[in-house]
Amino acid sequence: MGKDVLFVKDKIIKFDSLAIQSIKQQAALNLSGKMRYCFHENEEAEMQEMLFVVPRTGYARPHMHKDVAESHVIIDGEGYCIVFNDFGDIQDYFRVSPQHNFLYRISRKMWHMVVPISEQLVIYEIREGKFNNDTNIFPEWAPEENEIEKVKQYKQNLFAQIGETT
């Protein structure tokens, strides 16, 4: 695991606003701008619980989960959850923040992504089932994370489609 992934081993895990600010600062120090705190023991756990910090400049490729659903709670920041059909067309989108759709669930077999519009977005994710290389399925119609120019154009196109001027 990289410096942007940490397994928290405490028996009781608590986060307050100061802790959230601290992890946002830690994420900003990482080259990726990301941070993931895993509350489950390991990738074999039957339930995966994570706290993510995602920068506005970041990109998490659209994906689906064949066998698992996931729920998100937005702790801090703003963004959009975008849902796609099998061809990459936007099927639905909605703003997410502590004030707008702060809790939502994505069923299995749905292409989706979260796009931050604030400097950082903090998300608590709960997902059923073990993590393995087949957990996330990526579509051919979305650029890979290392395709920097394609990702930039793709995000601009998405924002134009949903009417976001960020």
Image: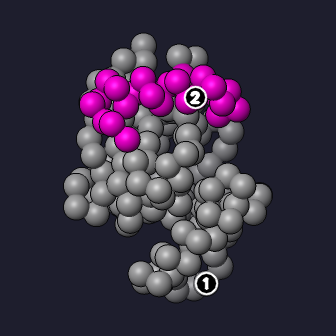
Instruction: Bin the neighbour count of mark 1 within 10 Å (Cα to Cα): few under 14, some 14-19, many 20 and up.
Output: few
Can you tell which mark lies on residue 158?
none
Q: Residue 125, image x and y in percent? A: 45, 58
Q: Residue at x 62, y 63 (%)?
A: 28
The magenta span reads 142-166
Considering the numbered disc 2 on the image, is that residue within a helix, a strand or a loop? Answer: helix
Instruction: Bin the neighbour count of mark 2 within 10 Å (Cα to Cα): few under 14, some 14-19, many 20 and up.
Output: some
Can residue 95 be seen here? The reply is yes
- Residue 51 or residue 134, whichever sits in front: 51
Q: On screen, 140 above or below 112?
A: above
Question: Image quadrant of residue 146?
Answer: top right
Q: On screen, 53 above or below 63?
A: below
- Residue 132 or residue 7, whichever sits in front: 7
Q: Is residue 138 magenta?
A: no
Considering the numbered disc 1 on the image, is that residue within a helix, a strand or a loop? Answer: loop
Type of amino acid at the residue the image marks with label 2: Val
Q: Residue at x 40, y 27 (%)?
A: 158
- Residue 94 or residue 116, whichever sits in front: 116
Q: Residue 88, image x and y in percent? A: 42, 18
Q: Residue at x 58, y 28 (%)?
A: 151
Nearer to us: label 1 or label 2 = 2
Q: Which residue is most to the top?
A: 87
Residue named by callout 1: 10
